[in-house]
Image (cartoon, grey):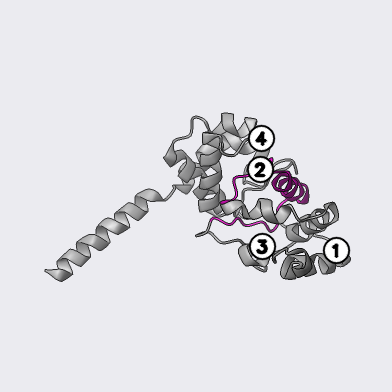
Amino acid sequence: MNKLLMTLIAALAFSGLAQAQGDIEAGKTKAVACTACHGADGNSPSNLYPKLAGQHASYLEKQLQQFKSGERENAIMLGMSAALSEQDIKDLAAYYRAQTTTPETIAAEIAEAGQKLYMGGSPQRKIPACTACHGPRGNGLALAKFPKISSQHPAYLKAQLENFRSKARNNDQNSMMTDIAGKLTDADIELLSHYISALH
């Protein structure tokens, strides 16, 4: 009896998990409306908009939900996300997660200077290492909804760090990014934006 019960519970759990996941092919069809800003494969041709290719599905779902609710403010994305259902959001997230991000490159001197701040932070200024949440290669952590930031456009990374610093963007968990970005100088942000973009 116990074996039968455990099998039934496992089957129900698996069924729930399968329903909770997005459909890549359905997402590809729905992503046609997103190509003008984010590119056909999620690699935005403009550095004004983020690359979505390879991003964690959990993070993409969170952002789309917050754009839709207005918790993350963006007039364009509010309009784009307004009509999305929960399944649409899951499908889009699954599609973009399955794409490959195009890499960025930087000069060796920027890599050396940026590595120190990214990997070690600044204890004197109470700035933690970026690796604590985003990992040594900038891959983030899907379960915690910490985004993949490597291979992103430097200009987009810079804009988001500045937005966190000014609190124009404040949808971060426990205000972690607003607190950290508030301690960064313009030079820090410029350096980190370029260094992070070239992490692979």
- Residue beneath disc 4: 36
- Work out how far the residue at label 4 is from the one at label 1, CA to CA, in angstroms: 31 Å
- Work out how far the residue at label 2 is from the one at label 4, CA to CA, in angstroms: 23 Å
Kindly state the secondary structure of the residue where label 3 is placed: loop
Res. 110 mark = 1
**Taking 106 as reference, is 60 above or below it?**
above
Residue 145 in percent (x, y) is at 54, 55
Asked if disc 1 and disc 3 are in contact, CB closer than 8 Å, the reply is no
N-terminal label among 1 and 3: 1
Crowd around label 4: few <14 · some 14–19 · many ≥20 (10 Å): few
Q: Amino acid at mark 3?
A: Gly
Residue 162 in percent (x, y) is at 75, 46
Q: Amino acid at mark 2?
A: Arg
In front of the other: 172 or 88: 172
The residue at 88%/66% (across/down) is 109
Kindly state the secondary structure of the residue where label 1 is placed: helix
Crowd around label 3: few <14 · some 14–19 · many ≥20 (10 Å): many
Residue 176 in percent (x, y) is at 63, 55
Asked if disc 2 and disc 4 are in contact, CB closer than 8 Å, the reply is no
Asked if disc 4 and disc 1 are in contact, CB closer than 8 Å, the reply is no
Q: Amino acid at mark 4?
A: Ala
